[in-house]
């Protein structure tokens, strides 16, 4: 009986997929990641999917569907940890007939599902999770797995370049870090610190760094340490509720009047808390705030339609997830064209995406690392502050670093590249 029921589900899913393409999107709908990442990413996805199904995206993405097939969208919760996400992915593919997966915020989620996506042979486009381990350790011979965004090394190396270029005087007494105590925070500090040491070895890190527990929420002890320290520049990759708690508790004690923070995920929080974001702190692009001045038809369309739909400008997670959908459209449409106008196989879609260079909403993507499965883009840094005239956060004194400046060359492990002095970086 159970086997018969399961077969019926699969047959129903197959019949549906003949007319549509079932696309699953995991993101945080509950928990600490939902307010900053989940809501914006879901909004961005739904806006772009609706436009694709109507053929309303600007050229060259103005045809209906993915290779002509409309998207049957399934958005589900990424909360619950890696084991739950593996189960969710198996259910989506094996029981619900999902054809494509676009999403994931957490590095932990991506690390958990990376090999499973290959085992299930499901095309999976990662949209946020930063760990370089995906293609350097976990899946060294990828076929079905792609990532449409820089890994975290690029952002932290970009931060190191910005500090050396713009904050050398502020960092003359050294610099320190406060990062969450797990792979994301540890890797972020490692890459930033080694990057600064390569570019300006005379700038010294504090002897002891702060690594509080993920989502601990209370940072009184760490703030006291930061206030007592002589170092003025502070690196932090805090995200979610942690960065908002740190800002609220730090502002109450005057932390941001005495320190300049290099927030690698600050742009997202600046969007969310607006005026409450401490002025003069650094945040990272190239999405969200940094995309405000990009004068391309698709970016202008995205920002305009997002404001109409959600009464606010799109933040980085909205861009990241919408870009994942646009990348899927690029791959399917390109594969269909190469297939003489017929709907392509998954292998043909993979071939179209490997080593490709194409435009997403706010940047140009080059799939140049991870044997053609890992994207690189440029990286931007600047100061975030409230603009009374515009009634929203803006970024100033922005510097853009080329993709080839902040990413390792193909075939070189990111950690080894940074430790080895970032040889081969092209920053001119």
Image: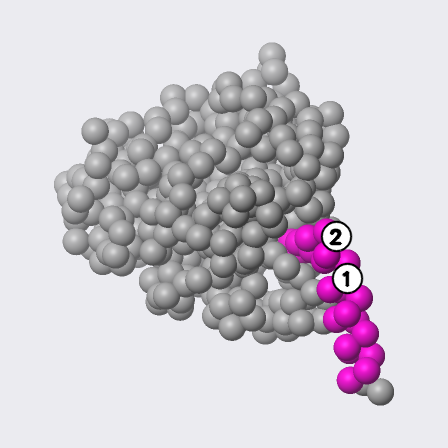
**Residue 332 placed where, x, y %?**
56, 46
Most frequent secondary structure within the magenta stretch: helix
**Residue lying farthest to the top in this orientation:** 389
**Residue 141 placed where, x, y %?**
37, 66
> Quick one: SS at disc 2?
helix
Is residue 425 visible from the viewing direction of this image? yes
Callout 1–callout 2 Cβ contact below 8 Å? yes
Write down the residue under mark 2.
19
Q: Is residue 101 above or below residue 303?
A: below
Q: Residue at x 49, y 39 (%)?
A: 266
**Residue 336 placed where, x, y %?**
55, 45
Q: Nearer the viewer, residue 279 or 166?
A: 166
Q: Quadrant of residue 142?
A: bottom left
Disc ID at residue 188: none
> Which part of the image, by quadrant, shows the C terminus?
top left
Q: Nearer the viewer, residue 153 or 357?
A: 357
Q: Residue at x 41, y 28 (%)?
A: 382
Q: Nearer the viewer, residue 89 or 28?
A: 89
Disc ID at residue 15: 1
> Magenta span has 276?
no
**Residue 23 placed where, x, y %?**
66, 54
Q: Residue at x 72, y 39 (%)?
A: 53
> Which part of the image, by quadrant, shows the N terminus?
bottom right
Q: Is residue 285 above or below residue 140?
A: above
What segment is highlighted magenta in the picture? 3-26
């Amino acid at each position: 009986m159970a086997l018969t029921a399961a077969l019926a589900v699969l047959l129903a899913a197959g019949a549906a997929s003949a007319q549509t393409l079932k696309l699953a999107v995991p993101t945080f709908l509950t928990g600490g990641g939902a307010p900053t990442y989940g809501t914006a990413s879901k909004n961005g996805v739904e806006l772009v999917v609706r436009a694709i199904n109507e053929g309303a995206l600007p050229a060259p993405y103005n045809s209906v569907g993915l290779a002509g097939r409309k998207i049957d969208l399934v958005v589900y919760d990424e909360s619950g940890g890696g084991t739950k996400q593996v189960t969710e992915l198996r259910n989506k593919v094996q029981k619900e007939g999902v054809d494509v997966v676009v999403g994931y915020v957490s590095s932990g989620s991506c690390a958990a599902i990376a090999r499973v996506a290959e085992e299930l042979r499901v095309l999976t486009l990662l949209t946020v999770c930063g760990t370089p381990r995906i293609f350097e350790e976990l899946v060294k011979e990828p076929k079905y797995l792609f990532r449409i965004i820089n890994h975290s090394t690029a952002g932290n190396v970009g931060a190191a370049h910005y500090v050396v270029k713009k904050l050398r005087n502020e960092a003359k007494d050294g610099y320190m870090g406060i990062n969450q105590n797990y792979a994301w925070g540890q890797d972020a500090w490692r890459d930033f610190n080694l990057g600064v040491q390569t570019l300006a070895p005379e700038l010294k890190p504090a002897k002891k760094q702060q690594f509080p527990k993920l989502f601990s929420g209370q940072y009184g002890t760490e703030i006291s340490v930061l206030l007592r320290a002589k170092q003025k520049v502070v690196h932090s990759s805090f995200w979610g509720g942690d960065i908002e708690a740190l800002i609220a508790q730090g502002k109450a004690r005057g932390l941001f009047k005495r320190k300049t923070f290099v927030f690698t995920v600050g742009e997202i929080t600046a969007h969310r808390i607006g005026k409450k974001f401490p002025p003069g702190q650094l945040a990272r692009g190239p999405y969200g705030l940094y995309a405000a001045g990009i004068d391309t038809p698709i970016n202008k369309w995205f920002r305009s339609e997002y404001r109409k739909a959600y009464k606010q400008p799109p933040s980085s997670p909205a861009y990241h997830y919408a870009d994942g959908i646009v990348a899927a459209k690029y791959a399917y449409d390109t594969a269909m064209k190469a297939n003489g106008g017929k709907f392509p196989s998954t292998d043909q879609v993979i071939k179209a995406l490997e080593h490709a260079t194409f435009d997403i909403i706010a940047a140009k993507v080059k799939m140049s690392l991870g044997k053609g499965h890992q994207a690189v883009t440029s990286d931007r840094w600047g100061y975030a502050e409230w603009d009374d005239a515009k009634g929203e956060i803006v970024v100033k004194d922005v510097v853009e670093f080329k993709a080839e400046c902040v990413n390792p060359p193909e075939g070189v492990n990111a950690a080894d590249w940074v430790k080895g002095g970032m040889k081969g970086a092209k920053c001119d």
